[in-house]
Image (tube, rainbow, N blue to C red):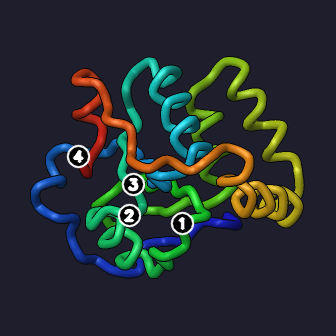
Amino acid sequence: MDGAVSNESDGPLPRQNAAAIGSHPIILYDRVCGLCNRFTQFVLRNDAHAVFRFASLQSAFATHLLERNSSNRRELETVYVVLKPGQTDELLLSRSDAVIFVLKYLGGIRRVAGYILAWIPWPLRDWGYRWLARNRYRLFGRLDACPVPSLEERGRFLDV
């Protein structure tokens, strides 16, 4: 799959997070990006079964996970979804592939939007993603600090 990076390392996740993760997909996002935070809030509101977990790209947790998957941790313009974290068949989806996965998983009209986006040829969709990512601070703002999740949501954030 274009935009996907397979796990080439078999190093375990940090012990303190291993039990909390299970087989939940993890969304890695830029914690100071207004667009990324809106996307995270969107997923929290629409994930009826509380399946997704979250970690900021700036966290040690994300650094370890991305290094294990041979990805550039300094690339804050990319949203990632980690499938089967900590397992031998761990998979890292990036950019538009990550967004499409989330939309399809959330279901309803969001699933339809995911299928429509998936029909767009990968190079064109990732070009659009990269343009939006380059301009995200100007269009959506930059936060001074990451918003604190509510008590109900806190358990879904792996770096809090």
**First of labels 4, 1 by sequence position:** 1
Is residue 125 shown left or right of residue 66? right
- 139 above or below 150? below
Classify mark 4: helix, strand or loop: loop
Rounded to the nearest angstrom, the CA distance separating label 4 from label 1 is: 19 Å
The answer to which image quadrant residue 93 occupies is: bottom right
Image marks 1 and 2: residues in contact by CB distance under 8 Å: yes
Kindly indicate whether the residue at mark 3 contacts the one at mark 2 (C-beta within 8 angstroms).
Answer: yes
Q: Earlier along the polypeptide chain: callout 1 or callout 2? A: 2
Residue that carries the numbered disc 2 in the rendered image = 58
Which comes before the other along the chain, label 1 or label 3?
3
Residue identifier under label 1: 76
Image coordinates of residue 96 in percent, x first then y, are 70, 54
Amino acid type of disc 4? Answer: Val
Foreground of the two, 139 or 16:
139
Circle 1: residue type: Leu
- At 49% from the left and 76% from the top, the residue drawn is 74
- Marks 4 and 3, Cα distance to the nearest angstrom? 9 Å
| Residue toward you, 113 or 57 | 57
Q: Position of residue 128 (x, y in %)?
A: 83, 57
Q: Is residue 80 left or right of residue 146?
A: right
Q: Secondary structure at mark 3?
A: strand
Q: Upstream in the sequence, badge 4 or badge 2?
A: 2
Q: CA distance from mark 2 to mark 3?
A: 5 Å
Mark 1 touches mark 3? (CB < 8 Å): no
The tag on residue 160 is 4
Q: Quick one: which residue is furthest to the front in this view?
A: 144
